[in-house]
Amino acid sequence: MAAGRSPADRVIRGGRLVNVHSREVLDGWDVAVKVGRFAYVGPDASHCIGEGTEVLDAGGRYLIPGLVDGHMHIESGMLTPAEFAAAVMPHGTTTMFTDPHEIANVLGLRGVRLMHDEALLQPVNIFTQMPSCAPSAPGLETTGWEITPEDVAEAMTWPGIIGLGEMMNFPGVAAGDAKMLAEIAATQRAGKTVGGHYASPDLGPAFHAYVAGGAADDHEGTCEADAIARVRQGMRAMLRLGSAWYDVESQITAITEKGLDPRNMVLCTDDCHSGTLVRDGHMNRVVRHAIDCGCDPLIALQMATVNTATHFGLERELGSIAPGRRADMILTSDLRSLPVELVIARGIDVARDGVGLVPCPHLDWPEDVRATVHLGKVLEAPDFEIRAPEGANTVTARVIGVVENQAPTKALTADLPVTDGIVEGTGGVAQIALVERHRGTGGVVNGFVSGFGYEGRMAMASTVAHDSHHMIVVGTDREMMAAAANRLGEVGGGVTIWKDGAEIALVELPIAGLMSDSPAAEVAAKADAMMAAMRACGCTLNNAYMQHSLLALVVIPELRISDLGLVDVTRFALTDLFETP
């Protein structure tokens, strides 16, 4: 077709082509598409036009490649792959590299396969990374299922598996843990990419050992030095802007001020919940933010297209408007504000002016996948009592300190009063509990958290509890903490908020206690009501739900909670709730 021997299915003319290979804008270049791929890209496609060829006039708009998300977790959007695809297509995302380690913690390899299979049905590209760490930190948490090197080796034979999901057990890799290295080896033998996760400020020998272990990228950087250190070691630095993590601005200066080569830097979301997707966008939001932070628009687009495709070995398949690639493209009238006016995926119009144009097929999710919350008993207020040491009138307690817009927490302490032998939260310190929900043991681990600003009598419970996905309950009233936990047991999972003895918000997430197969707009409306309810309880943090859901993530410093106890992530060890005098 490029030679003119057969007609194109479609020719787009009258546009301004953004070439991410040469980093230039080519006025008046034409694009010809055949069977879902770009065939001719050049100054004049007249020879490609024949009987039956559709000719589209771009009207002087920019033609840019479909946007690519380098690292994300679909489950964090509270949506199934089909509904997530339907939500992000209108924003110009045509490719996602996803790690379903949330569902892996609940349902194991079977859950990964369900996510993988629904992903392959979609009109956009969803590549799956096989989860590497379930549990994320062996010995510090108990998951519903455990991922093994044999599981990883099996998944590497599936058609949609692109590599290994983020290797969160970075201390294990640095120490030469046999299981972690076996998973990496299985991935490398398959010729696929190993995803990284180095959540530590220590850039000494431990960091270098982790890189030597095989991780090819990392998205846990929070400052310029992190981005520089990663690219200097041959990794891709993934700069993320999610619903609650704002790590682009602090790292993009490696390009804008230090002048580093941007080819080894990638933009990603990690992660956006449904409200962000519906209101603010997806990868288009990240690109706009990078530009607002001083990045050249063409470099920002490279970081959201060809850089990512190259990283995963797919440069010849997607990420640019060039011959042979999948015909994924956006038409936009401005490269800075990036209005997404037409989205083309595999040569087909899939969205126009914010409205999806094609269906996103669903799997028939099995019934048992909708019944994964097993509490083992009806919880009561005494289950959330924290007993003080014998004879104590006050205690010095370790407290998880929430940090706005960042994944790490602070390891704080607070002097708390004791009433009738029970420790009470006070002065902005609320209670937190981790309720076991996979095996119905009835186990509850209690602790303290600060930073949410909750006031009055309230409780919030969620079965989204990265990464073990037991149940996190935060509250100022133990009776309501019990009521909130029991409510999620009734509905099969989700998020509930209680205030003054009544439920004021509920987001049902029946699939694995993580996702809904309802449309994104419906889930987003309930998520918005949830956020309003958090504010009604005194919380003013930006997207505080994301902070809530990560309080059990025992691989990100400094202090977390698990079903085994309080975890000091700076030492990767369990620690006591109370400091000894």
Image (tube, rainbow, N blue to C red):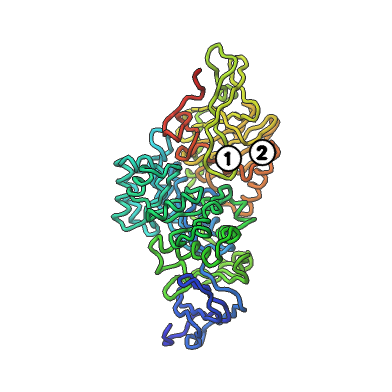
**Amino acid on which the number 2 mark rests in the picture:** Cys
Residue sitting at 69 percent across and 32 percent down?
455
Whichever of labels 2 and 1 marks the residue nearer the N terminus, that label is 1
Residue closest to the eye, 488 or 498: 498
Residue closest to the eye, 368 or 151: 151
Give how far apart the Cα atoms at labels 2 and 1 are.
13 Å
The quadrant holding residue 529 is: top right
Q: What is the quadrant of the N terminus in the image?
A: bottom left
Image location (x, y in percent) of residue 398: 53, 27
Mark 2 crowdedness (10 Å alpha carbons): few <14, some 14-19, many ≥20: some
**Amino acid on which the number 1 mark rests in the picture:** Val
Image location (x, y in percent) of residue 520: 60, 54
Residue closest to the eye, 142 or 219: 219
Q: Which mark is residue 318?
A: none
Report the residue marked by disc 2. Answer: 539
Asked if residue 122 can be seen in this view, the reply is no
Mark 1 crowdedness (10 Å alpha carbons): few <14, some 14-19, many ≥20: some
Image location (x, y in percent) of residue 427: 65, 27
Image location (x, y in percent) of residue 492: 55, 40
Residue sitting at 52 percent across and 73 percent down?
18
Total count of labels: 2
Report the residue marked by disc 1. Answer: 403
Q: Which mark is in front, 2 or 1?
A: 1
Examine the rendered structure and indicate whether residue 374 appears above or below residue 121: above
Asked if residue 484 can be seen in this view, the reply is yes
Mark 2, secondary structure of its residue: loop
